[in-house]
Image (cartoon, rainbow, N blue to C red):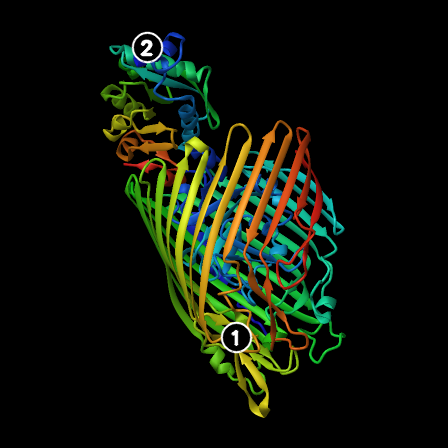
Amino acid sequence: MMTPNPGFPVRLALAAGVLAVAAGGRAAAQSIDYGALEQLFGEPVTLSVTGKPQRATDAPANIDIITQDDIRRSGATDIPGVLQFVTGLDVRRSGLAGADVGMRGYNQADNPRLMVLVDGRQVYMVDYGRIPWATLPVQLTEIRQIEVIRGPNSALYGFNAVGGVINIITCDPLHEPVTVASADGGTQNYAAGSAVATGRIGETAGLRLSLGGFRASDFPPGPLAEADALSRRNPYTGTLNADGRWQITPGIEAFLTAGAGDTRVPQISPAGAYDTESLHTNAVRVGLNAESGIGLLSLSAYRNEALVSVFADTASPGPMPVLAPSDFHERQIITVLQASDLVKLGTDHTVRIAVELRQNADNSALLSGSASNLIYAASLMWDWQMRPDLSVTNALRLDYVQLDYHGTPLPGAPFTRAQFDATTLSEPSFNSGVVWKATGQDTLRLTAARGVQLPTLMEQALQVPFGQVGPAAFYGRPNLNPSVIWNVELDYDRALPALDSTLRTAVFGQRIDDIIAWPFGGALSIGPGGIPSFTSENAGYSTAAGLEVGIKGHAESGWRWNASYSLATTTDHTVLNQGSPVTSVVEYAHSAPRNVVIAGIGYSRGRWEADLLARWQSSYLDFRMAPGFAGLQLVPVTVQNYVTANGRIAYRVMDNVTLALTLQQFNQARIAETAGPLIERRLILNATVRF
Amino acid sequence: MRSLLAIVPALLGGGPADAASLSAHDLQVLGRALAFAQPAPSGTQTLAIAYDSGNPASRGDAEALARLIGNGLRAGAAVLQPRLVDTASLAAGGFAVVLAAEGAAGEPVQAATRREKVLCVTADFAAVQAGSCVMAIRSEPRVEILVNHAAAAAAGIEFAAAFRMMIREI
């Protein structure tokens, strides 16, 4: 069974603590305060691109920062709803709460190519590297900004950060206290509530508590087969989170965040079937930030735990309708230790050195035991301000990965336990960027990157016998190569003061080598006894090219606007889905819309606030499981192009009380956004009280 | 005709003739930047607006700056109350920050701020590049802050590391 080593995090944390205390004696200043720096420079500030605090316009990456005002005005009830109207992002809903988010032409069910962080803690499921969007322990009202970085950023974050990074930053309880209560009601029997309260002890300690959740009736199953339809249950979530900061001295700050969640979300599985996943999650993160004579020291440790259970109907007719047994359970644990030093050397150079130790562990019936990855990583970032108008940034990271398997390979499995335990990987990744501020209004940005997507635990060690999820056996492959993502990009931004706007453009090219195909739909072979078996595999490569053009602005008159167009063309060169039947959801060339147009307009006057957001996207190809052929055969479904538009109007009844009415998808009662349930129009009434 | 149009706003009490070397927005930026000094000023302090008594334009700029600041400039936990000081009188001390008016960021200001270990701020980027003053600020078209690292060290001025990483240092 799974045996994460409890000793190593403790030893490292103790060592890190000694370093922090030693450095603390030379501490001289407070740690990073987003709000104060944003007010000073008049624009959002980010640490997400290089680890160094930067103005968004100076960062050597294509980054959008979604502010709390943007979130509120979107009328969205969850984070995918906010991201749906961001240039270059593809959001596909498999129901009212289930969603997958991709970037720049690459998306799929349970997309493993995105890195999502909440206050520096990476939130993902170690089984397939997917993002449990409905489980994120954060209320929309406590978010200060969501940072969207397009393109690979593995040199800072490691694996998963290959399509892009979404960094969710909440309000600092020490510097930005927020206390707010919110209640929603709407169609689909939607009822939601949240409460956020911040308390401070003097000037040196702050604690923010938040809790919230929703319940609703999900959209009807629509075109789903009977087994899939019966496997869906109505969604709910409930999360509780605490965020505490303590300024021990003017230069040393300690933080502790802890949270727990309970969610049930109908979703699409990696095999293309629909089921309902219940997650019980808890997480804790502790750390220290210290300003010292040797730079800004940061030490942190966190642990995410998720208890997973999947409900899939087992009683409906069909030869093999079962994706997973209804009593299926899984326990996933992520343990991470991180230490970094960020220091400015002289007047022109900033360097960040970081080390990371990570253990991803999964104990699952699908593994016939447990498996874990132990990852050692070291990274170096060097930012050089060559001239007042020209900066160069280079970042390099090395990852060493060791697979540890505790289980019994199935009889007839193609790999032995010794082969699992002998698996190691060493991979470098880099990010380089040049930012040239050609004039006070023009900025050019040239970036190049090598990102690494490590195989996930299911891709490496899955063990599913014949008959458990379909008429075949399914295996992971321990000796998979990681996917390597090469990316080059040229951006041009121009301030348009006459229009109170900023124009942003980007062209990019990308290539993914060694695409990893999940065991479901992977390489087919005939094993002993004539049993067909599928094994995960490196399936070939894919290339993509695209462009983004967008304008965004606002005027003192109260008007605001945005419009953008994005194009992403993708070509696959894989061994997957050659002829019939179609077996793999990895079909990048067709599985994301090629053209997307997003537009928005809003107006604020006095106590009123009104916003319209619209998105048009071209058609794409989605998949759902062929009835009775779990893991073996998929039905390709062309999702036709569509327009979806949201409207929100809000009125401030009192200085601290706002009522808002949001009509999501007001232009159409139902839209097929995936091969799954049709997405329905929603009406939501919200009341928010700020204290 | 163009010259005549330029004179009209001056006669009305506004426009270039009365414009201070730092705008209200610049001063707002200054207040916020001072919160990142180590240690940051606190309480009620004096902001010396230094001017060259032999230069009427310098005196005029200092007065314009004082009018813009009014009763005080908020800088984090501190309120800086303006006081006009002839550069020759800076030696008397008694201030937390020196704001060098037009033409004032010269040797006397440099000597006084180094001796008193206080920060010198100006709109004159050339003066900061020359080391006469520690910090220059402008807010349009975007916020730019320039700090002379050597001059800061000579005056014993330190800034928060995050702040240093986001400004231009020479």
A353 to the left or right of A407: left
| Relative height, residue A615 to residue B13 (above, below) | below
Which chain letter goes with mark 2?
Answer: B
Residue at the top extreme, as displayed: B11
Which residue is the site of mark 2? B4
> Would residue A171 be seen by someone viewing this image from the given angle?
no
Among the 4 quarters of the image, the one containing residue A57: top left
Among the 4 quarters of the image, the one containing residue A451: bottom left
Whole-percent x, y for residue A92 in the image: 59, 57
Whole-percent x, y for residue B55 in the image: 26, 12
Residue at figure coordinates x 56%, y 68% from the top left = A127
Which residue is the site of mark 1? A577
Q: Amino acid at mark 1?
A: Asn
> Would residue B166 be seen by someone viewing this image from the given angle?
yes
Q: What is the quadrant of the C terminus of chain B in the image?
A: top left
Callout 1 touching callout 2 (CB < 8 Å):
no
Which residue is at the front of the view, A676 or A73?
A676
Q: For the residues tagged 1 and 2, is the chain the same?
A: no
Bin the neighbour count of mark 1 within 10 Å (Cα to Cα): few under 14, some 14-19, many 20 and up. Answer: some
A215 to the left or right of A110: right
Q: What is the secondary structure assignment of the residue under circle 1?
A: loop
